[in-house]
Amino acid sequence: MTGATRVLVATTNPGKVRELAAILAGLPVELVGLGDLDGAPEVEETGATFMANALLKARAYAAWSGLAALADDSGLEVDALGGAPGVYSARYAGPGASDADNLAKLLGAIAAVPAAERTARFRCAAVLADPGGRTWEAEAAWEGRLLDAPRGDGGFGYDPVFVPDGWDRTSAEVDAATKNAASHRAMAFAALRPAVEAWAAGA
Ligand code: IMP
């Protein structure tokens, strides 16, 4: 895009860059991922909240790259488990756990919970940081309930057991476009869009 300002997305996943590009379409920004830059450092997610982790990543990558940076952190909160796995969603079954390991641990943990009490949400914190250290924040939750067995092979992570409110299918049983239009990430970055637009106008 001619005249577009480059913005770094703090992810090595090209799918996530494309997902954000769709949400931020029409803004004069060109999104690049960590894989597009040489020598990107790892940033450890040591925060106690999704927002703390998103702030850590956005600030670190903006400072490192000299570009504005977008970062997010997300996970699943299960009411019957007091909000777990929360910020530990990616490593619920231990360090290096696979999606399948995490899902199996979750199904074990909620096995005795009646269907009516299996309420949960995906939460996403999204942050824009500029290289000068200014930050803008947005957060969103996607409410739903958990099944007692997986359904569908789309999506990733806990999608096969998550039925969003108002849906009769899991977020793994719909196509990517349908999920990505409704998800916690979509809502959080849509809420952050005005900040990105204002920042790009002044950049
Ligand atoms: P991340 O912060 O987006 O990397 O997400 C951390 C972890 O939360 C993932 O490894 C998944 O276990 C879970 N998670 C986040 N978003 C989703 C989603 O959209 N579907 C299923 N699982 C998710």
Image: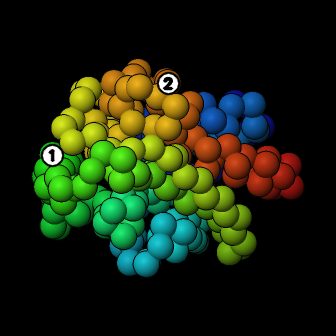
**How far across and how far down the image is residue 171, in percent?**
38, 33
Q: Is residue 160 above or below residue 146?
A: above
**How far across and how far down the image is residue 187, in percent?**
61, 44
Type of amino acid at the residue the image marks with label 2: Thr
Q: Earlier along the polypeptide chain: callout 2 or callout 1?
A: 1
Which residue sits at x=40%, y=51%?
119
List the residue tagged with mark 1.
100
Is any part of residue 37 visible from this angle? no
Q: Is residue 127 above or below residue 150?
A: below
**How far across and how far down the image is residue 148, in percent?**
21, 42
Looking at the picture, tell me which residue is in the foreground, 170 or 22. 170
Type of amino acid at the residue the image marks with label 1: Ala
List the residue tagged with mark 2.
178
**How far across and how far down the image is residue 73, in percent?**
46, 59
Q: Is residue 175 above or below residue 48?
A: above
Residue density around tag 2, few if under 14, some if 14–19, many if 20 or more, within 10 Å: few
SS at badge 1:
helix
Which residue sits at x=75%, y=37%?
27
Looking at the picture, tell me which residue is in the foreground, 183 or 57. 183
